[in-house]
Image: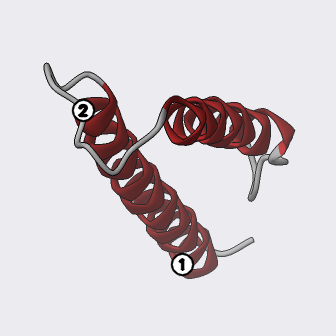
Amino acid sequence: MSKKNNCHNYDTILLTINEIERKINNLQEGISKIKTKMTSSEPAEEQCVDELEADKAALEAIQGMCFDVLLEREPEGEA
């Protein structure tokens, strides 16, 4: 493999890693917003206990999916 192709492969890998990192950061921001809403000192009147429990379950499911996706992802390129 030529040096030019090798550099191109590394660039592709770095772009992929940057995209994954951006998606993870977006998920973390969303999770933080959900946590903030859930841990506020006084829940809003229109929210009931069932709604809060559903939000908490959704948060846990999202976290689990994020970890699963990261663990299942196959390495790309040459290592």
Residue visible at 23% across and 33% down? 36
Query: What is the number of the mark on residue 24?
Result: none
**Which residue in the rendered view is the most extreme toward the left?**
41
Amino acid beneath label 1:
His
Label 2, secondary structure: give it. Answer: loop
Q: Position of residue 41 (x, y in %)?
A: 13, 19
**Which residue in the rendered view is the most extreme toward the front?**
45
- The crowd level at tag 2 (other Cα within 10 Å; few <14, some 14-19, many 20+) is few
Query: From the viewer's perspective, is residue 19 above or below residue 38?
Result: below
Residue visible at 26% across and 38% down? 37
Q: Quadrant of residue 38?
A: top left
Amino acid beneath label 2:
Pro
12 horizontally vs 11: left or right? right
Label 1, secondary structure: give it. Answer: helix
Rendered-image quadrant of the C terminus: top right
Q: Position of residue 4 (x, y in %)?
A: 53, 80
Residue visible at 78% across and 47% down? 75
Residue visible at 33% across and 51% down? 46
Query: From the viewer's perspective, is residue 13 above or below residue 39?
Result: below
